[in-house]
Image: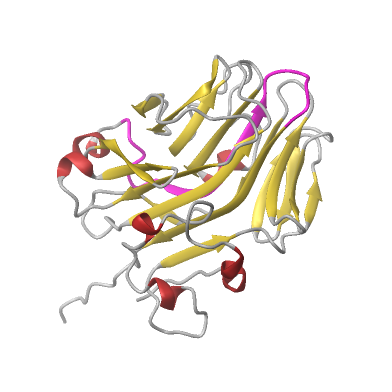
Amino acid sequence: MTNRLVEYHDTLATTPLGANGPTFELWKHVPGLSALMNPYSALGAGRFIHDDFLRCGAQMGVAGALVGSVGPYACFSTATTGWVGADDEDAVATLALDADNDEAYLSGGSGAFVISDTAGEDRELIFEARIKQTSIEDNELVFALGLISPADAQAAGALIDDTGEIADAASFLGFRSLTADGDAPAAGFAEAAGAGFTNSIAAPYVPVINTYNKLGFHYNPRAIPAERIAWWVDGTRQTTFVTATQIAASSFPDQEEMTMAYLVKLGSAAAETGTMSWWRIWQEPIVDVPVAP
């Protein structure tokens, strides 16, 4: 059985490969990628989403409630000043805040993606996105980007007030920053049982205000045990990995259903904005194993 989910395939031409687009060296691992990007092809295998927000429209936040949808996504904002939407002209998604502890989240809504080392569930996955922030100062704007448990991306508190930590109830894999160290985002993971966030790389890059970075990861269950999840930053594969031993441990969100998400939270009363120009995800298909009669 092939599971295919393709969004905004016809805007791929506005997101070229290269310095500003998806990293070729990362995405060349996807079999049949050209077929996946063609909605009329039956050859594409897996779940694939690419979006550059060219046609998402815009949505104003509502205090303390699920905002609703921005294009195909679920979005959330904790205050009427919070805003999650898309700039159609520039083809970017914007998450804007201007009050202390405001938060705004953009997510895929459903838990369509799973990282697991269990036989039959161990399906390869690649994620990458391009984001920038108006502040990297301490106690100002923090973010989380990657995969997260869907319920936590649609309610307040996925990022904890005053620290920016991932909430104990959330499963997460990706990149995040903290209010105490805004210019040193980390790559890592957290499991919903409350084990806390585990740094895989404490500071894989140094962000610059209003400058885009491409952040991604590649889970390959067929890679050597020491390199099961590779982190990618600005087109470069990092040399520190999530290992098979870490995935098997109770602190990793193994077999947790997660959704792609971009979360921002404000640690001061100064208005700040997080911006994403595109994101992309692919996972291998679920394969039905024939049952002997």
Q: Quadrant of residue 153?
A: top right
Residue occupying image coordinates x 23% and y 72%: 289
Say whether residue 264 is magenta. Answer: yes
As rendered, which of 287 and 238 lies closer to the eye? 238
> What's the residue at 15%, 78% (across, down)?
292
Find residue 254 and report its image quarter: top left
Q: Is residue 288 left or right of residue 90?
A: left
Q: Nearer the viewer, residue 293 or 256?
A: 256
Left or right of 99? Residue 11 is left
Quadrant (top left, top right, bottom left, bottom right) of the N terminus: bottom left
**Magenta range:** 251-272
* Above or below for 239 versus 22: above
- Please name the residue shown 70% across and 60% down the image: 71
Above or below: residue 126 compared with residue 3: above
**Up/down of 159 relative to 253, above or below:** above
Residue 268, magenta (yes or no): yes
**Residue 252 visible in the picture:** yes
